[in-house]
């Protein structure tokens, strides 16, 4: 009887990891551009900076994960979109400083590595990178037996972008009378899923595969819809118009994210009747009897990103967004105050 211990007998399958690399390779390479200097498999990703037109380059970085939205991917055994969520959460954040994303790296950890599943995850990351116009230049896949439940994994990533120092968006120039333009979300994006799962799956016992007429799709399809990436239309706006502030509406909803870009002496007045809310938010609010303030403290409510501009630039911004396939809504105005978010209705 052979009692020799091996890494594989301890739960780590190196050969499966190598197979995963081969399966994900084409997805990774599909994001490469002329600035990427190496191929997948090196110890570090190499990226050559193109500084044309940039006088004082500033690198802007952001990191994030997907949160408990991953639980839905596990339940549905669907893993090819969750990577886009990870990319979106990072690139949308650095976009708020006016940065153009350059490259992205991901990290996936699991108890037992399945090559096809990891390749599906990375496929979603590659889709997100291409949507953001950045390269996936590296990452890490960790097999950690006994650390994660069977079939589960965690993932995170980080993005690096570039901006010209004189054009970094800080929010300092925001003044009363400025206009708030909201960009539609694709749905819940990647925040509030602990509440969603507790309410819809545990309390209401709803089936992820059941068709919900008011949602025009199955519950699982709607909940797993990937986070929208706003990079290309917003960068086009930034190139042509002075954008005073940008807010990515993520965890903490309106009340946490909007004040992050406001000066101390102004408020943001938000007209909550100025856009149509995706039906998933109405369903959540009704099923849970959730207050309006709690909804806007937790979810994006159909607005994934906000731009603050001068009134005279409003029409130009809306036109530029529309030319890039993005519909903007005038959802509010800046007023004198003390860095508060105030919800109002028509």
Image (cartoon, rainbow, N blue to C red):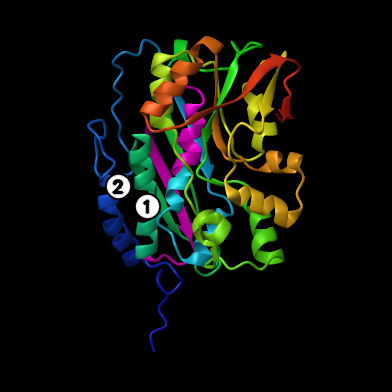
Q: Does residue 70 appear to the left or right of 343 in the view shown?
A: left
Q: Residue furthest bottom?
A: 1
**Is 136 covered by the magenta stretch?**
no
Q: Does residue 145 appear to the left or right of 275 in the view shown?
A: left
Mark 1 Cα shell of 10 Å, populated few (<14), some (14-19), many (≥20): many
Residue linked to disc 1: 122
Magenta-tinted stretch = 87-114
- Point out residue 294 in the picture as x, y percentages from the top left corner: 74, 43
- Point out residue 210 in the picture as x, y percentages from the top left corner: 54, 67
Viewer-nearest residue: 112 or 122: 122
The answer to whether 55 is drawn above or below residue 218 in the figure is above
Rendered residue at 38%/30% (across/down): 232
Q: How many marks?
A: 2
Q: Secondary structure at mark 2?
A: helix
Q: Indicate which disc residue 312 carries.
A: none
Residue linked to disc 2: 28
Rendered residue at 69%/23% (across/down): 269
Q: Secondary structure at mark 1?
A: helix
The answer to which of marks 2 and 1 sits earlier in the sequence is 2
The answer to whether 338 is drawn above or below residue 82 in the figure is above
Are the residues tagged 2 and 1 within 8 Å (C-beta)?
yes
- Point out residue 53 in the picture as x, y percentages from the top left corner: 31, 13
Q: Quadrant of residue 198?
A: bottom right
Marks 2/1: CA–CA distance? 7 Å
């Amino acid at each position: 009887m052979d009692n020799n211990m091996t890494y594989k007998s301890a739960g780590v399958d190196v050969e499966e990891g190598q197979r995963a690399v081969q399966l994900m390779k084409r997805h990774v390479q599909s994001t490469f551009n002329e600035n990427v200097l190496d191929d997948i498999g090196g110890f570090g990703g190499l990226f050559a900076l193109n500084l044309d037109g940039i006088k004082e380059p500033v690198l802007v970085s952001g990191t994030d994960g997907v949160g408990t939205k991953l639980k839905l991917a596990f339940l549905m055994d669907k893993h090819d979109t969750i990577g886009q969520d990870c990319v979106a959460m990072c690139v949308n954040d650095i976009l708020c400083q006016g940065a153009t994303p350059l490259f992205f790296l991901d990290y996936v950890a699991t108890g037992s590595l399945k090559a096809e599943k990891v390749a599906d995850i990375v496929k979603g990351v590659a889709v997100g990178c291409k949507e953001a116009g950045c390269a996936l230049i590296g990452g890490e896949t960790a097999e950690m037996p006994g650390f994660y439940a069977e079939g589960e994994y965690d993932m995170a990533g980080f993005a690096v972008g570039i901006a010209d120092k004189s054009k970094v968006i800080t929010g300092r120039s925001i003044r009363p009378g400025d206009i708030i333009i909201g960009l539609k979300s694709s749905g819940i994006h990647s925040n509030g899923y602990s509440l969603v799962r507790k309410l819809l799956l545990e309390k209401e016992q709803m089936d992820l595969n059941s068709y919900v007429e008011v949602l025009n799709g199955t519950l699982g399809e709607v909940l797993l819809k990937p986070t929208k990436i706003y990079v290309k239309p917003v960068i086009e706006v930034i190139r042509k118009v002075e954008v005073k502030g940008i807010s990515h509406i993520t965890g903490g909803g309106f009340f946490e994210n909007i004040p992050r870009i406001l000066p101390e002496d102004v408020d943001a007045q938000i007209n909550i009747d100025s856009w149509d809310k995706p039906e998933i938010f109405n369903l959540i609010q009704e099923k849970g009897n959730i207050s309006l303030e709690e909804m806007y403290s937790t979810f994006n409510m159909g607005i994934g990103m906000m731009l603050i501009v001068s009134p005279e630039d409003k029409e130009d911004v809306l036109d530029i967004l529309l030319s890039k396939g993005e519909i903007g809504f005038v959802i509010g105005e800046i007023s004198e105050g003390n860095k508060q978010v105030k919800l109002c209705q028509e």
